[in-house]
Image (tube, rainbow, N blue to C red):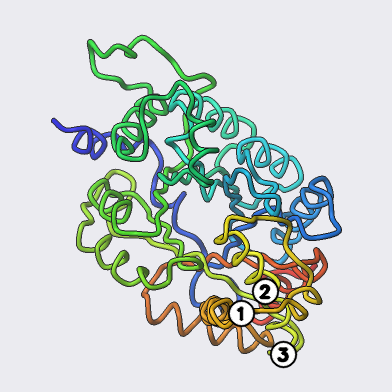
Amino acid sequence: MTSEEQQEHRTGPGTGEAIRGTARGTAPAPLSILDLATVGVGYTPGQALAATTELARRAEQWGYHRFWVAEHHGMPGVASSTPAVLLAHLGAHTTTLRLGSGGVMLPNHAPLAIAEQFGLLEALHPGRIDLGLGRAPGTDPATARALRRGLAEGADDFPLQLSELTHFLDGDFPSGHPYGRLTAVPRGEGRPPVWLLGSSGFSAQLAGRLGLPFAFAHHFSSANTIPALDLYRTSFRPSAVLSEPYALIGVSAVAADDETAARRLARSAALGMLRLRRGNPGPIPTPEEAEEYPYSPAEAEFIDSWLDNVVLGAPGQVADGLEALRNRTGVDELMVTSHIHGHEARFRSYGLIAEAYGLTATA
């Protein structure tokens, strides 16, 4: 039996109810948040993490379904380098919000270490933890090599690493396995649902074959969204976790008083991404810096292309744009991210989106 076939039979005690979200207010699908603990120019990482904590608290009050943080390294504009640490902190400041990794980059870690970290998170915050896994490094090649020192596997070994991780989570290595007598502790009655994340077809197909939920990074790989989702659905085989496919997409969304104000905020994120792509990552620039930057024709084209993939505008415009995207992709859940400068601007963007949908509570 291959590692993938073994995984199909070891999807764990989690159920679809722990995966499927609840649509609230007038939203036709569950709404969630992906946060990167954004560090903008003029702010410290400590201030960024405090803002993420406050955002999680508000997200719970507003009625968002889940709140994920992502593993990135070597990026001064992102403070969420270690999701498990941050999730433990966020769990202590919320009570009902689902928390998870969007995601942990599995090739950077020993599977046993991740099983222990998320077993501990589940023990601390039972029934509220999601384990989203990616196969990219979440950083540049040199940093990836430093992170993986001593680890023989890489992204190509992701299916085997995933199989090993779920064996540790479920405590069911087959007889005679070298790790058969090892136990990832703590391990309680439940364990976090495993999600596969991706920006191409590899994880989409793997998630489908294993009957796992799938999260696609539409916010930075929009050209691949429809093909990857189609591949996930056509590859899907029912499992003990899901009887039918369940997919969400990450979406860049910025809400403000009007489209002009929202576009001005979004341009700061676009300039930050331009610098990252050029190998010069830094804190997210201010809107003023983005306005004054002397763009070359190629740079201006990149910015315009990037902004075309952001759902932005007044609250009603954003709600309409998200619904159009949901209809086009057929996804089960939308996970919005506002990676913009200024904590209050981020709070307001998420709050206006929640208000536009009439979610269950107000901050």
Compared to 86, does 283 lie above or below? below
- Amino acid type at mark 2: Ala
- Secondary element under disc 1, as helix, strand or loop, is loop
- Rendered location of residue 18, percent (x, y): 46, 49
Viewer-nearest residue: 105 or 129 = 105
- Secondary element under disc 2, as helix, strand or loop, is helix
Residue 354 circle label: 2
- Secondary element under disc 3, as helix, strand or loop, is helix
Circle 1 is placed at which residue position? 296
Q: Label 2 crowding class (10 Å Cα cut-off): few <14, some 14-19, many 20+?
A: many
299 displayed left or right of 267:
left
- Amino acid type at mark 1: Ser
Residue sitting at 42 percent across and 67 percent down? Answer: 332
Tell which tag, 3 or 2, sits nearer the viewer.
3
Question: Which comes sooner in the sequence, label 3 or label 1?
Answer: 3
Circle 3 is placed at which residue position? 260
